[in-house]
Amino acid sequence: MYYVVTTAILVTMALALARALLGPTVYDRVLAVNMFGTKTVLLVAIVAFLSGRPDFLDLALAYALINFVGVLAVLEFFQKKRHFGGRQ
Amino acid sequence: MIIDVLSFAMLALGGFFVFLGGLGALRLPDLYTRMHAASLTDSLGTILTLGGIMLQSGWSLATVKLLTILFFLLMTGPTASYALANAALLSRDDDAPALPPAAGGRE
């Protein structure tokens, strides 16, 4: 059963990567990367139990926090950049 | 035994919802509907998947770590969604998609 969930999460990560590559605006890409990070946390937690080593859950916890801070930083960057008149 | 069946059912449902959200994030037409699909995987997929392996782990330190991960994901997911929608809405005039017609009446 772990393998089914792992496959579903991996397929979803591939779909999120496709959206990040296709996404017309930068916000679509940020949304896809955020989703990819959340699915990575789930994948690490599943693989920790799949391989019988629950210590990996610490990595999942750290990844969740870093992913959140990263998404907020990217959004803040684009907002500030627009506010000060920068164009990409 | 019952716990195993319950846990496998939760894992299967979680994988299904995660896949459904990924499909929606790829296929839906604009940013806000994609956020709606992605938030499905953030809430229901996370709760069901982590709950399923929480049932497998029993009472141990791993359960506490899983609860912490679940708590942080449930706190940070809506916050990131709010920040994303806010940023996209504020920059609507240059490169963000327009609002859907039902909500865009206050131009």
Image (tube, coloured by chain):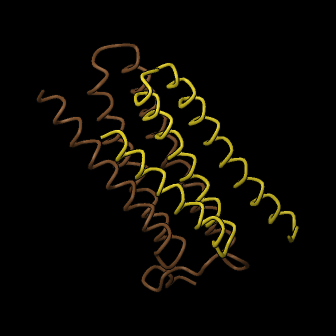
Chain colours: A yellow, B brown
Q: What's the residue at 39%, 43% (across, down)? A: B46
Q: Quadrant of residue A16?
A: bottom right
Q: Quick check: B56 above or below A77?
A: above
Q: Quick check: B93 above or below A16?
A: below
Asked if residue B1 lies left or right of residue A33, the reply is left
Q: Position of residue A60 (x, y in %)?
A: 54, 31
Q: What's the residue at 16%, 28% (across, down)? A: B3
Q: Position of residue A47 (x, y in %)?
A: 46, 33
Q: Quick check: A24 above or below B41?
A: below
Q: Position of residue B26 (x, y in %)?
A: 50, 70
Q: For the C terminus of chain B, which image quadrant?
A: bottom right
B43 vs B7, nearest the viewer: B7
Q: What's the residue at 64%, 59% (across, down)? A: A30
Return the residue found at the far left: B2
Asked if residue A9 lies left or right of residue A87, the reply is left
A84 vs B20, nearest the viewer: B20
Q: Quadrant of residue A26?
A: bottom right
Q: For the N terminus of chain B, which image quadrant?
A: top left
Q: Position of residue B73 (x, y in %)?
A: 47, 39
Give the mark count: 0
Asked if residue A24 lies left or right of residue A3, the reply is right
Asked if residue A4 lies left or right of residue B29, the reply is left
B93 vs B50, nearest the viewer: B50
Q: Quadrant of residue B52?
A: top left
